[in-house]
Amino acid sequence: MPVMPDRWIREQAREARMIEPFVESQKRDGVISYGLSSYGYDARCSDQFKVFTNVDSAVVDPKAFNQASFVDRAGPVCIIPPNSFALTHTVEYFRIPRDVLVICLGKSTYARCGIIVNVTPLEPEWEGQVTIEISNTTPLPAKIYAGEGICQFLFLRGDGPCEISYADKAGKYMGQRGVALPRM
């Protein structure tokens, strides 16, 4: 499974609308970088955030998630409380080819501050805005910047198309826009 280069990512973005909107080159002047890189694409986080709060001392249950556990915030900056997390989504909308699996890694600028980004793999033929979990592992409040780079996506191309894609399974997170909370 080779990691696909910038040339291939650019072609897929133009011809197959794999990433929209697509930024042709890395933008980095005064911002956390985003856009096309050598072997990946650095996506931006939106200005919509769901910040985890435990006001009601709720139990986190992925099978019955209580939406009241989040406080909605919108704006150019999000402050994540110490030892907490927030959800946001990418500015970009992704359409993954049938023979590609996408892996996401957090930006080193955030990681070096104790801010960890988690995204599960984007499966073949999945499409949507990606929900991103941002954990503040520090004992201090952490600042996240909307419209700037939050993570890098690496595109791994298989030897051929898979037998059953995410679209074939009618996956529960298909076509999502905005932040998608846990679903059963």
Image (cartoon, grey):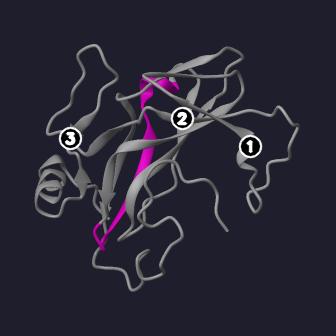
Q: Nearer the viewer, mark 2 or mark 3?
A: 2
Point out the tag, 3 or 1, that comes first from the N-terminus: 3
Q: Are marks 2 and 3 in contact (CB under 8 Å)?
A: no
Question: Can you say whether 114 is above or below 24 in the image?
Answer: above
Within 10 angstroms of label 2, few (less than 14), some, or many (20 or more) residues?
A: many
Q: Secondary structure at mark 3?
A: loop
**Horizontal and vertical percent for residue 3?**
28, 55
**Residue 139: quadrant of the picture:** top right
Amino acid at pointer 1: Ala
Q: Secondary structure at mark 1?
A: helix
Query: Label 2 belongs to which residue?
Result: 49
Query: Horizontal placement of 58 versus 135: left or right?
Result: right
- Quarter of the image containing the N terminus? bottom left
Question: Can you say whether 177 is above or below 115 in the image?
Answer: below
**Horizontal and vertical percent for residue 75?**
46, 25
Judged from this view, the residue extending furthest toward the bottom is 163
Point out the tag, 2 or 1, that comes first from the N-terminus: 2
- Quarter of the image containing the C terminus? bottom right
Residue that appears at 43% across and 54% down:
177
Q: CA distance from mark 3 to mark 1?
A: 41 Å
Query: Horizontal placement of 179 versus 27: left or right?
Result: right
Residue that appears at 24% across and 45% down:
39
Residue that appears at 30% across and 79% down:
161
Q: Which residues are magenta?
A: 97-111
**Horizontal and vertical percent for residue 178?**
46, 48
**Horizontal and vertical percent for residue 80?**
62, 24
Query: Label 1 belongs to which residue?
Result: 68
Query: Label 3 belongs to which residue?
Result: 38
Within 10 angstroms of label 3, few (less than 14), some, or many (20 or more) residues?
A: few
Residue nearest the viewer, comparing 157 with 130? 130
